[in-house]
Structure formats: structure tokens, C-alpha cells
């Protein structure tokens, strides 16, 4: 005899042709509802993962992971401090910098800027600025040349290109025979970078050579501080606490989470809330599964009674309908995973095709940081969705299965 009996009969009921086609339709709609819910949830979370990845790449391409300075923003014996910071566990690289706020002007147009003096040979170890260059080169930031690198948006606003002159104006005043005037210096545009829209890098940041910055800011041989790149960017807050304990008391330290942490937390919360809302689609489909199984139980009352008279226990009867409902939930989940993965893998091309056919741009880089619909499938999301769908399907079978186990043979066979 086939054992376990519940599994055998439950599978037989699932694949058997029912006399009541309405019950079959309800069961099929339950299966399709679970499949659609799972597919939609996988696709939406994959798209949100894609946006999250693009945003993180944009931020961490230029954003400084850890910044070390002191209260006076002047570190004189900076070579010794650079060696100390580079030796800290988890620190991949350290770069000295000199930074100040000012105005950059050209042709009567003036825009605010944060100008940073850097060592071009260090920058590749700290950020992706060398890869973001679309014109010119960081190597042209040589000492004494007074060259400057601008963001693409800032260059467009000023109407300048490689070789053009811009004037950098600092808020610090200089005393001259003509009176007190702001400090300013003419620079030659030697490079333009494109970090993408959305975070103000292209419209706010400018870079010059560290030696030129020291002269312009009257720092002498001092620097404003250090930028650090760490092995694990998400461990930067914890590492900051460890590093500050080993520095003099007048030093300060900050990390990327203080400026961008709230933004990433909002993205994570949005993803979580979207997942919970879309789980309701699967929950609605499981309600259809409850209705389907209740009708199956009513349709099989005589079969249940006969099984009971043959010695089947209430637990065996309950297992039959749990198996039947679980199979429907499993098939629906499997179809949903296959459909969701197929859609998530091709959603970028699909949206691009729709934009081409309708001649309407659905995704604009001015709003979404990118001009296409990104998608990134994460195995952990797919596994969690599958578990949630299977658990809800299993829970949906409990009440109809319990009702079937409570069937009394005498009452069920009275009118047969």
C-alpha cells in the first residue's frame, strides 16, 4: 500500500478532473493569483535594487568615505599623520587635501563651488574621479600650473571648456593699496568630469592641485585634512570610532553616513514597505485558495466519509487537503518565480522598447538619476518571497483541512 496515504490521495485529488468546473476555475485562479503576486514582487524589488545600486555607485564614485581633520583645519606635520592613518586596520588609502568654499566666475556668470586641492596620483586610490573624466585629464593638475577640473554641469553653466579661463574667488579678504578686496585667482580649465546628476557633484565640486591650493589658501605646508578609503564602506561609521581614539584630542572625524545615511535609510524603508504592500497580492490569492479548498471539501464529503469508515483518522483527512492546497501554492509560486525572473531580467529592454514605440520617455535622468530602468536580482529577495508565498499557502489550507477532518461519516452519507 502506498504510504503516506495523505500524500497519495492529496496528489490524486490535485490532478483529477473535477465534476464541478467552477471549483477547478477557483483553484486555477488561486494558482495564477499566487504566480502573478510572486512575479510582480520579484520584478518590483529587482527594479528597486537596480535603482539602489545605481545611486550607491553615483554616491561612492566621489563621496569621501571618511574625512579626518582638526578644529583649525590645518595639519602641519601631515606626512607623519598620513603614515599613521594608512597603518590603521581596514584603511585602504589616505589622501591629504586642502578645501575651501568660494565662487567660480567666467564671462559674467558666477556660481558657488567647493574647491579641493588634491594630489592627482592619490585620487585613483580614493575615488573614481579619474574614470569619470570626459575631457582633459587629472594629470594636468601640476604644481604651479594653476589648472582646474570642473564638473560637467558647472562647465555648462559657465559656458567653458578645456583651455578656457575661469576666476576662482575666495571669501577671505586681502588688504591691498586699493583697499580690502576678495582673494581671487585665474585658473585654466584642464579637465571636465561627469559624475551624473542628483547629488550636486557636477555642479558644485571643483579640483585643483594641492600645492596650488596651499598657496591660494595661505596654508603654507599644511593641509586641511585627509580623505580615507576603507576596505568595507559600510563599516566606515564603526571604523571612525576606532580611528578617532588613536588621534590627538583636537582632531575630528566624519564619514559618509552622516551626510548620506538618512537617504539610504529612506530607500531601505521604501523597499521594505513596498514589499509588505505587494505581499498583500499574494495574501489575496491565498484567500481564493481557502475558498477553493472549502468547496472541494464540500464536494468530497462522501469520499471523506468512506475513507473514515475504512479507518482513516482525522489527521489523515486533514493531511489530504493540506497536500492538495500546498501543491497549488507550490505550483503558483514556481510559476511566479520563473515569470518574475524572466521579467526582471528583461525589464530594462522592455521599457526601452516601449519608449521607442510610444516615443515617450518614461525614465528621465533629471528625476531618477538614470535614463533607463535598472534591474538587479538578489537571491535573498527571491528566497524570502518564495518562503512567504509557500507559508501563506500552507496557512490557507489549515482551515479547510480542519473542516474536512471534522466531517462525520453518518451525516455525510445520510443523503447519498
Image (cartoon, grey):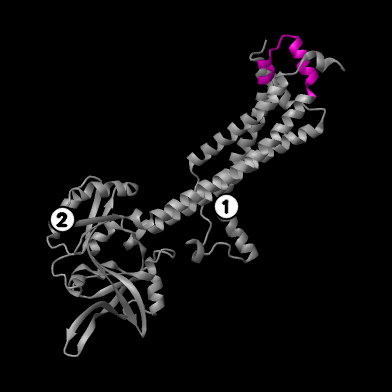
Using a 10 Å C-alpha cutoff, classify the residue at mark 1 as few (fewer than 14 neighbours), some (14 to 19) or many (20 or more).
many
Identify the image quadrant of residue 329: top right
Task: Specify whether residue 339 is in view.
Answer: no
Q: Is residue 162 left or right of residue 292?
A: left
Q: Percent from the top left, x then y, of residue 151?
A: 36, 70
Work out whether 72 lies above or below 316.
below
Which residues, given as a range, are shown in magenta? Answer: 299-319
Front label number (2 vs 1)? 2
Q: Residue at x 31, y 58 (%)?
A: 64
Mark 2: secondary structure: helix
Q: Is residue 114 above or below residue 178?
A: above
**Disc 1, SS:** helix
Q: Residue at x 19, y 52 (%)?
A: 85
* Disc 2 from disc 1: Cα separation: 50 Å
Could you say which disc has been placed on residue 347 in the image? 1
Residue 336, how many percent across, how many down? 62, 40
**Residue depicted at x 28% and y 78%:** 168
Q: Earlier in the sequence, mark 2 or mark 1?
A: 2
- Name the quadrant containing residue 220: bottom left
Q: Quadrant of residue 114?
A: bottom left
Instruction: Indicate yes or no whether the magenta region holds residue 188.
Output: no
Q: Is residue 38 above or below residue 53?
A: above
Amino acid at each position: 500500500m502506498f504510504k503516506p496515504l495523505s500524500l497519495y490521495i492529496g496528489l490524486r485529488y490535485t490532478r483529477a478532473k473535477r465534476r464541478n468546473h467552477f471549483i477547478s476555475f477557483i483553484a486555477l485562479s488561486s494558482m495564477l493569483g499566487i504566480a502573478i503576486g510572486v512575479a510582480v514582487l520579484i520584478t518590483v524589488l529587482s527594479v528597486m535594487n537596480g535603482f539602489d545600486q545605481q545611486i550607491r555607485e553615483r554616491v561612492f564614485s566621489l563621496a569621501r568615505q571618511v574625512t579626518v581633520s582638526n578644529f583649525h583645519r590645518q595639519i602641519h606635520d601631515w606626512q607623519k599623520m598620513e603614515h599613521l592613518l594608512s597603518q590603521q586596520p581596514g584603511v585602504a588609502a589616505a589622501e591629504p587635501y586642502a578645501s575651501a568654499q568660494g565662487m567660480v566666475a567666467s564671462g559674467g556668470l558666477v556660481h558657488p563651488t567647493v574647491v579641493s586641492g588634491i594630489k592627482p596620483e592619490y585620487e585613483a586610490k580614493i575615488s573614481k574621479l579619474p574614470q569619470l573624466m570626459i575631457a582633459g585629464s587629472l594629470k594636468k593638475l601640476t604644481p604651479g600650473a594653476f589648472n582646474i577640473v570642473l564638473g560637467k554641469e558647472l562647465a555648462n553653466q559657465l559656458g567653458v571648456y578645456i583651455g578656457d579661463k575661469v576666476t576662482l574667488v575666495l571669501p577671505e579678504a586681502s588688504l591691498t593699496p586699493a583697499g580690502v578686496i576678495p582673494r581671487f585667482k585665474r585658473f585654466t580649465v584642464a579637465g571636465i568630469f561627469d559624475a551624473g546628476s542628483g547629488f550636486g557633484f557636477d555642479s558644485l565640486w571643483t579640483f585643483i592641485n594641492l600645492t596650488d591650493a596651499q598657496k591660494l589658501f595661505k596654508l603654507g605646508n599644511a593641509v586641511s585634512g585627509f580623505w580615507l578609503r576603507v576596505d568595507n564602506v559600510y563599516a566606515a561609521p564603526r571604523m571612525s570610532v576606532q580611528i578617532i581614539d588613536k588621534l590627538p584630542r583636537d582632531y575630528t572625524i566624519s564619514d559618509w553616513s552622516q551626510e548620506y545615511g538618512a537617504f539610504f535609510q529612506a530607500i531601505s524603508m521604501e523597499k521594505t514597505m513596498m514589499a509588505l504592500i505587494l505581499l498583500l497580492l499574494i495574501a489575496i490569492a491565498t484567500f481564493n485558495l481557502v475558498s477553493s479548498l472549502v468547496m472541494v471539501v464540500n464536494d468530497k464529503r462522501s469520499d471523506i466519509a468512506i475513507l473514515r469508515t475504512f479507518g482513516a483518522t482525522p489527521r489523515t483527512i486533514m493531511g489530504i487537503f493540506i497536500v492538495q492546497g500546498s501543491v497549488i501554492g507550490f505550483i503558483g509560486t514556481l510559476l511566479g518565480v520563473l515569470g518574475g525572473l524572466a521579467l526582471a531580467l528583461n525589464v530594462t529592454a522592455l521599457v526601452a522598447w516601449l519608449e521607442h514605440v510610444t516615443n515617450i520617455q518614461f525614465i528621465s535622468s533629471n528625476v531618477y538619476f538614470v535614463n533607463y530602468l535598472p534591474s538587479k536580482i538578489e537571491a535573498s529577495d527571491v528566497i524570502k518571497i518564495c518562503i512567504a508565498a509557500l507559508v501563506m499557502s500552507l496557512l490557507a489550507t489549515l482551515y479547510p483541512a480542519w473542516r474536512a477532518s471534522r466531517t462525520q461519516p453518518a451525516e455525510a452519507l445520510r443523503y447519498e
